[in-house]
Image: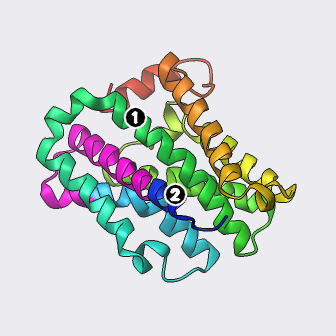
Amino acid sequence: MSDVPVLLVLDLLGTFAFALNGALTAVRVARVDLVGVVTLGIITGVGGGIVRDVLLGALPPASFRDGRYLAAAAAGGVLAFLFGRGLQRFQRPIDVLDAAGLGLFAVTGAGKALALGAGPAQAVILGVVTAVGGGTMRDVLVRRVPVVLTSELYAIPALVGATLAVLAAAGGVDEVLGAPAALGAALACFAVRMVGLHYGLDAPRPPGAWDAGARADDPDR
């Protein structure tokens, strides 16, 4: 899965969308200043990729070797700080960009893991980590249970995209189709995420009083 220009542009767009959405979430749930908003946006945008690269021993992480990733993430954080209240009206387009970023990060994360010698199962896990790691780090920093563990169909779409990417590579499809195969896997992740958003679907939850406890602990509820 080579860094062809189209995938690079989409990857940067996904980084921006992740950072923007992450910073907007930080504004809603935590009392943070300019530094806090931008920092949390950057962490959301590039945190998952940093964790992946550290686990793979690919140092320094890609976001430190290519300043465009940090610039895209910082831009998302600054935009959220300056226009946060007005941007809330455009939450659906932002969610669409975020879903696109989720798929692209899951696929590129799995692809990089395979390229650096990880096995198929490890590559799938690292693809998911790339996609959801930044948001998880943001939630921990603002002192709430990570959303990916409590609500929203988020980790499952990432798992679908990463798995399809690894299967395409194992079957030789990726070598034949290249970018189209990667985009197809990312599109599958995107589609599952958008279905979840449209219908308000969550991953299965345990029975009993779990929901009541979650509502009490979640600042968004």
Q: 10 and 105: which one is in front?
A: 10
Locate residue 152 relative to residue 15 in the image: left or right.
Answer: right
Is 214 within the magenta? no
Q: Quadrant of the N terminus?
A: bottom right
- From the top left corner, tell me how far across and down residue 79 is, in percent: 19, 49
Q: Which residues are magenta?
A: 12-39
Q: CA distance from mark 1 to mark 2?
A: 21 Å
> Which residue matches tag 1?
95
Q: Quadrant of the C terminus?
A: top left
Residue type, label 2: Val
Residue type, label 1: Asp
Neighbour tally class for label 2: few under 14, some 14-19, many 20 plus, Cα within 10 Å: few
Residue 6 marker: 2
The colour scheme is rainbow
Q: 163 and 155: which one is in front?
A: 163
- From the top left corner, tell me how far across and down residue 78 is, in percent: 19, 55
